[in-house]
Image (spheres, grey):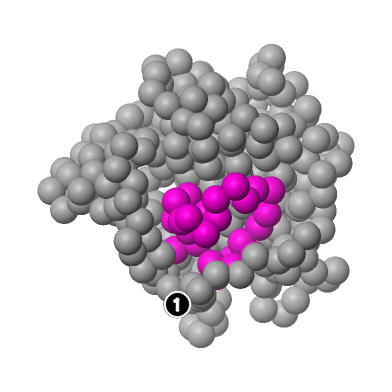
Amino acid sequence: MTRISTPFAFHSTAQAVLAGVDLSGKRAIITGGAAGIGVETARALVNAGAHVTLAVRRPQAAQTLAAELNVQGRGRVDVRSLDLADLDSVRAFTQNWSEPLHILVNNAGIMAVPERTLSAQGWEIQFATNFLGHFALVGGLQDALVRADGARVVSLSSSANLLGPVVFDDINFDFRPYDAFAAYAQAKSACALLAVEITRRWADQGVFANAVNPGAIATRLQKHTGGLKTPIERQKNVQQGAATSVLLAASPLLEGVGGRYFEDCNEALVVDRRPADYTGVAPYALDPDNARRLWEAALRMIGSAAR
């Protein structure tokens, strides 16, 4: 399989990636779209003409951003409530969605929660928020994605995939001592595997998914870690951080591409050990057997008969 490269790179911005792209008539959902790189992802899609829904935990706080984007962009913005850590909230969101869905950006996330915390349904909170809620969201929106006749799902992973795989026999840290970064690592490896399995299951229905490492961007994501520790030369601003997400969400260069992992606007190398600069993707995070196993485990976790 040929590795995909594009004219864009580390310093490219979301606006540059979508220059000349017309998304008029397209519907998009961005989870966590009112903070961090989600804001710039939304801005780029709206400026290209898309109708974007910001799916957020605090909808009232997102209304100011929505009003701003509605004035600035060619498209439209609305806000809907979604708490990914509560599967009842995810179910309510999907049941109230009736339109075809062309773009789903699974952007929201939490990082390195210092103490083991459980979600509303009893799952470790980083796995529940970063992966399981998005898994349930994708499943609940499957028909809407299929009806778009060429939908794209963007699953935000991280260089943290290089810190460890999904530990299938103890996802919930019921036996292992809880470790904040091990929990984050397995959740982000799971996000990459989600893109692999969505594509395997649904590509023949026109739904393609890819995973993205947006890079090191100073946002509230690092609130539990004392701030961003990445060397300055490897840091991005939020406009650069959103670039790979919008590339996968809407660029014609990625038409019909799925099941891959991208960073710096290009497909990443699969590495056999963790590099010093944390670039690349671990083979276990793209392994099709792991992806199938994770899908089945997630179905059991959410108690769903999703296909």
Magenta segment boundaries in residue numbering:
243-267
Choose between 17 and 188: the one closer to the eye: 17
Q: Residue furthest bottom?
A: 233
Q: Residue at x 71, y 44 (%)?
A: 196
Residue topped by disc 1: 11
Amino acid bearing label 1: His
- Image coordinates for residue 63, horizontal then vertical, percent: 21, 39
- Which residue is at the front of the view, 10 or 66? 10
Question: Where 21 sits versus 230, above or below?
Answer: above
Query: In the rendered view, would you say 60 is above or below 259?
Result: above
Which residue appears at 80% of the width and 35% of the height?
292
19 relative position to 276: left or right: left
Looking at the picture, tell me which residue is in the foreground, 75 or 132: 75
Q: In x, y percent, where is residue 99?
A: 38, 23
Q: Please indicate, yes or no, whether residue 17 appears anywhere in the rendered image.
A: yes
Q: Crowdedness of circle 1 by 10 Å Cα count: few (<14), some, many (20+)?
A: some
Tag 1's secondary structure? loop
Quarter of the picture holding the C terminus: top right
Q: Is residue 247 magenta?
A: yes
